[in-house]
Image (cartoon, rainbow, N blue to C red):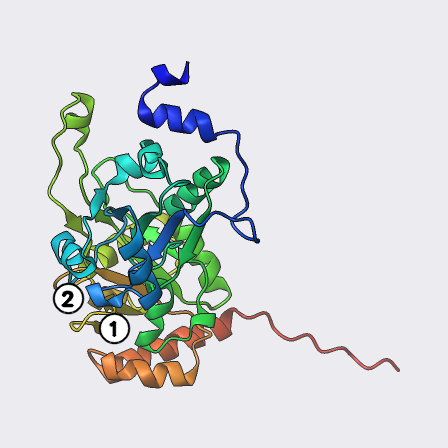
């Protein structure tokens, strides 16, 4: 019966009942490796990651949650001395069996820009490998989640990270607004990850079954700031305003890395340049050392300092008054 199945289906059927541990003395030596590439250059991969890539039978590059800013697929192939297979969203999320096929018999590498567990889809791939009895190992690297500290903000002062997608005329999701509200209520910074559209279909082409893809799009700072303010206008809960101090983060980890400290309204007017971009909304628990560091990136030091002080004053005004117990006679 198994001989009649396609290769991928046969592999899944043969391995679905297995449950192998990824640790201990009896672990496999052949496995799936989830390898972080860092943020920009081919050389950002760790030494250990590079050694693993060079011994793998197949090497996949996840190519839709982020991009390696200063390196192409061909650059990676030249540096590794290996063929690199592009893994788009459809392959990873709908046809992961092709990636996992034979990974219990040969080493397979799955390359991720940033860190392997920076996106939920990579966790899902690990879960599928585990369910098939395929050992896996992660080799970590820098990602926006930790490298954002280069702007001067302390990582332990960050709250929940949110994602902001490109708005459409009839679709403007605002779930991020409530997460920002929760962060700002307790004074924490919010890292906003900006949308990336790679190998995406229009609704018309999708409905007609045409495999025609839109050109890649990467959200810039000015679009992100404008969309954030648009949702504030709609929700009108004063979670943030055009005067809220923020930091734009552009091309993080590359030689063209740039930070701009300004109000959200000002960021809606800047030209942020080439991708990739992120944005940070400051919280009122900001430390004086963070402020001092950020001032070097301010479009106007005086105006940014004033915006931060207004943020702190607003936070103090919102604190409940301290209750003083009366002495009992």
Can you tell which mark lies on residue 270? 2
Q: Residues within 10 Å of mark 1 (few under 14, many from 20)?
A: many
Q: Quadrant of the N terminus?
A: top left
Q: Residue 217: x and y, percent?
A: 15, 48
Residue 251 seen in the figure: no
The answer to whether residue 257 of the structure is visible from this angle is yes
Q: Nearer the viewer, residue 161 or 267?
A: 161
Q: Quadrant of the C terminus?
A: bottom right
Up/down of 178 relative to 44, above or below: above
- Local secondary structure at mark 2: loop
What residue do we see at 41% from left, 28% from top?
12
Measured in 3D between alpha carbons, the distance from the residue under mark 1 to the one under mark 2, in whole angstroms, is 10 Å
Image coords of residue 260 (percent x, y): 22, 73
Q: Position of residue 130 (x, y in %)?
A: 49, 41
Q: Where, by quadrant of the figure, is residue 43 drawn?
A: bottom left
Q: Quarter of the image holding residue 220?
A: bottom left
Residue 326 sits above or below residue 229 on the image:
below
State the residue at coordinates (35%, 47%).
Answer: 107
Q: Is residue 34 left or right of residue 66?
A: right
């Amino acid at each position: 019966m198994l001989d009649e199945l396609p290769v991928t289906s046969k592999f899944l059927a043969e391995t679905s009942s297995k449950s192998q541990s990824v640790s201990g003395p009896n672990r496999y030596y052949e496995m799936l490796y989830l390898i972080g590439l860092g943020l920009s250059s081919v050389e950002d991969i760790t030494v250990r990651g590079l050694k693993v890539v060079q011994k793998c039978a197949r090497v996949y590059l996840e190519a839709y949650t982020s991009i390696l800013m200063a390196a192409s697929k061909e650059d990676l192939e030249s540096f590794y001395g290996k063929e690199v297979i592009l893994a788009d969203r459809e392959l990873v999320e709908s046809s992961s069996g092709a990636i996992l096929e034979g990974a219990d018999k040969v080493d397979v590498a799955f390359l991720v820009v940033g860190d392997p567990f920076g996106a939920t889809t990579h966790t899902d791939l690990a879960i599928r490998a585990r369910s098939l009895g395929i050992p896996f190992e992660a080799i970590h690297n820098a990602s926006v989640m930790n490298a954002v500290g280069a702007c001067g903000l302390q990582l332990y002062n960050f709250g929940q990270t949110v994602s902001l997608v490109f708005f459409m005329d009839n679709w403007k999701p605002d779930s991020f607004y409530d997460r920002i509200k929760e962060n700002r209520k307790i004074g924490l910074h919010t890292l906003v990850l900006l949308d990336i559209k790679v190998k995406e279909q229009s609704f018309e082409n999708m409905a007609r079954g045409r495999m025609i893809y839109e050109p890649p799009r990467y959200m810039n700072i000015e679009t992100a700031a404008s969309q954030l303010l648009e949702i504030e206008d709609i929700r009108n809960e004063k979670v943030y305003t055009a005067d809220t101090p923020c930091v734009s983060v552009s091309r993080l980890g590359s030689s063209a890395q740039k930070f701009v400290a300004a109000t959200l309204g000002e960021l809606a007017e800047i030209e942020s340049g080439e991708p990739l971009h992120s944005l940070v909304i400051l919280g009122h628990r900001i430390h004086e050392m963070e402020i001092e560091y950020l001032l070097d990136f301010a479009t106007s030091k005086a105006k940014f300092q004033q915006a931060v002080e207004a943020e702190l004053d607003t936070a103090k005004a919102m604190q409940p008054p301290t209750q003083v117990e009366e002495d009992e006679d």
